[in-house]
Amino acid sequence: MDKEQVGLVLNLECLVAVSPDVVFQLLTEPGELVKWWGPLGFFLPQVDVDLAVGGRYRFLMAPPEGEPFHLSGEFLQVNRPSRLVYTFRWDEPGPDDRETVVDLSLQASGGGTRLMLTQKPFLTDERLSLHRDGWTESFEKLRAVGGSLQ
């Protein structure tokens, strides 16, 4: 299979200074998601989450400048507090966008949590890079929120 068929894969890790139970809440509860989701300068004016296998989520994301936009998906696995798997798509995708699957794994580590993300398949290196940058900045915000809960 070539890259076009398989797609590109994003892998990231993040250490958060709170337990997997707390990190899972930060990843899934609307009141917590608004504190950290999105790249620096972005915020979530609206968060809808039906946290169950087959349940859906939809976020309205507002960039620092420009019009807000939606992203949404469906929960494929919900294993509190160790794993969360869901589809991810922009509600008005660009030509090089495709629906991806986000797989978040949480492991207790030294009094905190090691959060491992895999997201795939991306169609282009540019899309993978955009998501890498977004998740990296989001994870910085997540670490800060987790650190404030200690």
Image (tube, rainbow, N blue to C red):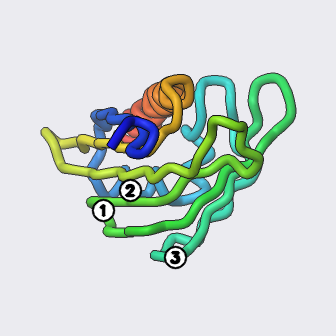
> What residue is disc 2 on?
24
Secondary structure category for the residue under label 3: loop
Location of residue 57 in the rendering, given as x and y in whole percent from the top left corner: 62, 63
Sequence-earlier tag: 3 or 2: 2
Query: What type is the residue that disc 1 sits on?
Result: Pro
Which quarter of the picture shows residue 42? Answer: top right
Sequence-earlier tag: 3 or 1: 3
> What residue is disc 1 on?
81
Q: Is residue 99 above or below residue 48?
A: above
Indicate the quadrant containing the C terminus: top left, top right, bottom left or bottom right: top left
Secondary structure category for the residue under label 2: helix
Q: Is residue 78 above or below residue 127?
A: below
> Mark 3 or mark 2: which is in front?
3
Q: Residue at x 28, y 52 (%)?
A: 105
The mark found on residue 54 in the picture is 3
Q: Are marks 2 and 1 in contact (CB under 8 Å)?
A: yes
Q: Residue at x 48, y 33 (%)?
A: 135
Q: Is residue 70 left or right of residue 150?
A: right
Residue neighbourhood size for the residue with mark 2, other residues' Cα within 10 Å, grouped as few (<14), some (14–19), many (≥20): many
> Mark 3 or mark 1: which is in front?
3
Location of residue 26 in the rendering, given as x and y in whole percent from the top left corner: 46, 51
For the residues marked 3 and 1, what is the alpha-carbon distance in whole angstroms?
18 Å
Indicate the quadrant containing the N terminus: top left, top right, bottom left or bottom right: top left
Q: Is residue 4 visible?
A: yes
Q: Is residue 108 above or below residue 67?
A: below
Q: Are marks 3 and 2 in contact (CB under 8 Å)?
A: no
Location of residue 98 in the rendering, given as x and y in whole percent from the top left corner: 59, 46
Residue toward you, 125 or 15: 125
Q: Residue at x 43, y 57 (%)?
A: 25
